[in-house]
Image (cartoon, grey):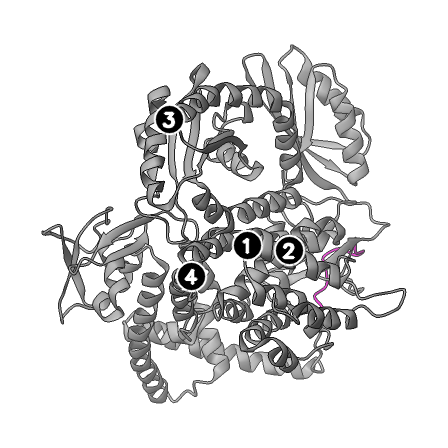
Amino acid sequence: MEKNDVMLIRKALEVTVPDSDNPERRTSGVLRVIHALEVALVVVNEIGLGRTSVICSLLYDAVLDNKISEKKVETLFGDQAAGIVRGLVKVNELYAQNTSIQNENFRKLLLTFAQDVRVVLIIIADKLHTMRSLKQYAENDQIRISGEVGYLYAPMAHRLGLYNIKSEMEDLVMKYSNREVYSEIARKLNETKKARDKYIKEFIAPLKKELSENGLKFEIKGRTKTIHSIWNKIKNQNTKFEQVYDLFAIRVILFSELKNEKSECWQVYSMVTDKYQPNPSRLRDWISVPKSNGYESLHTTVLGPENKWVEVQIRTDRMNEIAEKGLAAHWKYKGIKGEKGMDEWLSNVREILENPELNAVDFIEDFKLDLYEDEVFVFTPKGELRRLKKGATVLDFAFEIHTEVGKKCVGARVNNKNVPIKYQLQNGDHVEINTSSNQEPKQDWLNIVVTSKAISKLKQVLRDIQFKEAELGKEMLLRRFKNWKIELNDQLLRQIMKKYGFKAMHDLYYAVAKDQIDFSHLKDFVLQALSKEKESDIVEKSAGNYNTEIIESSSDDDVLMIDKNLKHIDYSLAKCCNPIFGDDIFGFVSVSGGIKIHRKTCPNAADMHTNFGYRIVNAEWTSGVDTSYQATLKVTGVDDIGIVTNITQVINKESNVKLRSISIDSNEGSFEGTLTVFVNNLNSLSSLSKKIKNVKGVYAVSRIGAGS
C-alpha cells in the first residue's frame, strides 16, 4: 500500500456502513463491507495479487452503491484501478439482468472478463467467498450459484493455475448440488483417516531418511484427494469408494536455489523410484516444459507397501506457490509486469468473443474445450515452440498459425514425412503446413479440429461460405414465388421453415441453393397453407375474434399454482425425477410452450438453473385434489426366501398405495430391486419407505431420481 491508501479506503468504506440498526447487506445477509474484506483477503492470501487489486476488491461494492464514483476512484488510485472497477461494475450489471449461459449477455460478461486479467481473478475471489457462505442463501440461489460456479468459475480457476481454489469450489459445488453423495464420501474419509495417516507415515519414513542423508532441504506431506475428485474416480471407473486406491498423494517440496531446482527434483525422483517400483506410463514431466498456466512439477505413481499404488509429486517451494496461487505467483517469480502468459490466453478469448457470428451457447461450448485438457508441444519450421491441446491435429496447428493457412491446408510435413490434415500431433513434432489455392474448407473438418480457436475460426469460415450460398438461394426462392404469383411474407416463411425443420431463414435459403428442396412439393404445401389460412379467417370472424393466452389444463381442478397465482396452465410432471404431491418443486418452460414440473433435487436441476435460468418459474402444490403419482424406490437387502413376498404384503396393506411393477436382481446372497408404486403424496411414500425398511433382511430403501 502507498502512504495515503489506507486512509482513503477507510474513508470510502465508512460511507458504505451507515450509522443505523440495518447496515447494508448482501442477499446472503452478510454485511457488504465484511464481504469486501473477505474477498480482498482471498485476493491477497490465496491468489497473491497486489495493491491495485486489493483496492478494487474493497471499493467495488461502494461504487455499486454510488457511495463513491468511478471518476473518484480514478482520481484517488489511478487509471488501472478505475478500469478494473469499471469491469467489475459491468459484470454486476449483466448479472442484474439475470444473465444465464444461454443468454447473449453471457458472452458480454466473458468479454468483460477478457479486458483485464485482474477482473477475472477478483470475480473468482468473489465467487469463492460466496460459495463459502452459500448456506446463508435461499435454496434456489444455492442451486443456481453452485451450478454456475461448477460450470464456469471452477474450470476458469483451473485454467489460471489456481488449483486450491478450483478444488475447494468443486467440493462446495458438490456439497450443495449432490449433498447425499458428498456427505457419504466425507463420512467414509473421516472413518478411514487413522489408517490412511498410518500408511502415509510408513511410506514417507524411508524417503525422509534418504533425502536427509543426501543433504537436501525438504518437506514431505500426504494430501488427501478432494471429495469431488474421488467421486469422479468412482463414476469414471464404475467402482466403489473402498476400491479407489489413490485416495491421497505424497508431495515432496524442496527448498532449492533456482539454478539447482531441476537437477534436485530429478535427484528426488531417482530416490523415490529406487525405494518403490514406478509405473512408467504414469510419469508426468512438467518441469522441462511447464503447463501454459505456469504449473511445474514432476508426477509419478509408485507401488508402495501392501502393494498399493501411490501418487508422488515432486516440486520446489517456488513451484508449489505457483501451483497454489497460479499465474500471479508465476509473474512474481519471473518479474513479469505485463503478465504475458495470461495476456496470450485472454487475447485468444477476445478474438473468439469478438466474432459477431458466434452466439453465447456456441462460445461456451468451444471455450470449455480448452479449460481442463493437457497440452502437446510442437515446433514450427523456424524452431518456435507452439502449445496446443492434447489431441490437436495438423489442421488445428494450421489455424493456430493463421486463419488463411487453415482454410487452404491440405496436409503437412511432420518430421520430414507427409501426413494428412487429421494427423494427431505428438510432443516434439516439427511441423510444416502444406497449402493449396484450390483448397476449400469443408463441414466435416469440424470433426477433425479440437482446439477452441480452430473450431471458432472454422465455424466462421463455413458460415461465410454458407452466407454467400444462402444469398443465391434467397434469390432463387423469390424468383419461384414471383413465377407462382404468390407473395412470400414472413408468416409464410415461418410456416415453410417449420415444415422443413429449419431454425433460421438462412438455413432454408442455403438448402434451396443446394437443391435440397423439391419445388413441386413446396408449391403444394404453400397453396394448402394459404387455403387453410382463408378458412381460419372465416372461422375467426364468426367466433368474434376470441383469443386467450392461457392454455387450459386437462384436469378440472388444478393441483398446482404456477408463478404468480396462475392456474389452469398446461403442465406435466417430469419423468427424470417423478415429483409427487408434497415435494419441493419448480417449473421449467419447455420449448413446446408447456411447463414441466421438476423436483428441486432433480439430477438435472443444477444444469437447468445454470443454462436456462430465464425459463425457471416458481411452482407449489395446492390442496384438495385426489391424484395418484408414480414413484420408484430402490431396495437392497439379504436374498432370503420369502423376502419379496414380505415386501409386497407391506405394499398391499397400504390403502393409498398401488404397486405398478417390481424388479429384483440377486447376486452372491444379496438382492437389489426397484419398486414402482402409485401414491397420493410424499407422506404416503415416506411412510411406505419406513415400513419396507423395517422388513427383516432389508438393508436400505431410497427413492430413485432424487439427485443423488
Callout 3, which amino acid?
Answer: Asn
Q: Are marks 2 and 4 in contact (CB under 8 Å)?
A: no
Q: Marks 4/3: CA distance?
A: 38 Å
Q: Marks 4/1: CA distance?
A: 14 Å
Mark earlier in primary sequence (1, 2)? 2
Q: Which callout, 2 or 4, points to the residue nearer the camera?
A: 2
Rendered image quadrant of residue 542 = bottom right
Q: Secondary structure at mark 3?
A: loop
Query: In the orientation shown, which residue stands out farthest toward the right?
Result: 21
Q: Which span is picked out in magenta?
A: 549-559
Residue 530 to residue 21: above or below = below
Q: How many marks?
A: 4
Mark earlier in primary sequence (2, 3)? 2
Mark earlier in primary sequence (1, 3)? 1
Quadrant placement of the C terminus: top right
Callout 1, which amino acid?
Answer: Ile
Mark earlier in primary sequence (2, 4)? 2
Q: Which callout, 2 or 3, points to the residue nearer the camera?
A: 3
Name the residue tied to disc 2.
41
Q: Marks 2/4: CA distance?
A: 22 Å
Name the residue tied to disc 3.
214
Name the residue tied to disc 4.
342
In the image, taking residue 496 as reference, residue 615 lies left or right, namely right
Callout 2, which amino acid?
Answer: Leu
Residue 306 to residue 8: above or below = above
Q: Are marks 1 and 2 in contact (CB under 8 Å)?
A: no
Q: Residue at x 44, y 64 (%)?
A: 363
Q: Which callout, 4 or 3, points to the residue nearer the camera?
A: 3
Q: Are marks 4 and 3 in contact (CB under 8 Å)?
A: no
Residue 697 x, y percent position in the rendering = 69, 14
Q: Secondary structure at mark 2?
A: helix
